[in-house]
Image: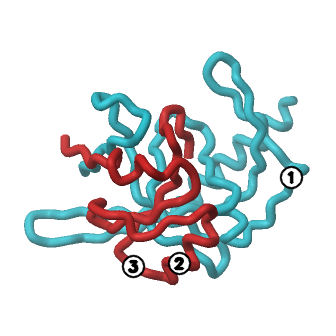
Chain colours: A red, B cyan
Amino acid sequence: MTKIDLTKLLQKYKSGWVALSSDYKRVVASAKNFSELQDKLKNRSNVVVIQAFENYYNFVS
Amino acid sequence: MRYPYFLVPGQPRNASTPFIKVIYKHATKRTTPMLALVDSGAQVSFAPLDLALWLGVRVDTKKYLDIRGFNNAQSRVTENLKSIKFGLRLKMKERSIQEVMESEEAIEQIEELIKKIQNAK
């Protein structure tokens, strides 16, 4: 099954939130909190948001 | 229906993570698509607090739920978010079909389960 590798894109973001392009190839924006990220995105489409962690082991959502 | 798995920091390269795109909705606000973890064994779904606050969910810190996990580890969470919208995009040959499901029925079932757990205490 296809795996999408986000490790290089996300490795420098240890906390906060990150918006990725919908093809998962680049970071569009990042912010410390969700509200700040939404302000940066301003209803932009074709993005996917993910919480940023140094380590996603034991991630729960 | 097939969804890709993801490789993320901190995970071994042979252990990928099942994320799907979801949209959180509350009143008139909705988020951009977000990646959330699929956990078919979970009885409760979680969302980050700052997300709930952005949506305008009234967080009642007096109403909480003790979540019990592996090795009897316990975490305390507040129960507030009412609905999550799962967006699915299906590709059949050369056509794209977009199907959106409201999961409010599932949320109601979860809320009933939470009430039962609290009443049992």
Q: How would you rate the neighbour count of disc 3 (Cα within 10 Å): few for under 14, some for 14-19, many for 20 or more?
A: few
- The image position of residue A50, as x and y in percent, is 47, 57
Point 74% across, 67% down: residue:
B57
Q: CA distance from mark 3 to mark 1?
A: 33 Å
- Reading the image, the residue beneath label 2 is A40
Q: Camera-side residue: B23 or B15?
A: B15
Marked residue nearer the N-terminal end (2 or 3): 2
Element class at badge 2: helix
Query: Picture quarter containing residue B64?
Result: top right
Which labelled disc corresponds to residue A45?
Answer: 3
Q: Is residue A53 left or right of residue B61?
A: left
- The image position of residue A17, as x and y in percent, is 54, 59
- Reading the image, the residue beneath label 1 is B61
Where is B35 relative to B37, above or below? Answer: below
Q: CA distance from mark 2 to mark 1?
A: 29 Å
Same-subunit check for callouts 2 and 1 = no
Query: Picture quarter containing residue B114?
Result: top right
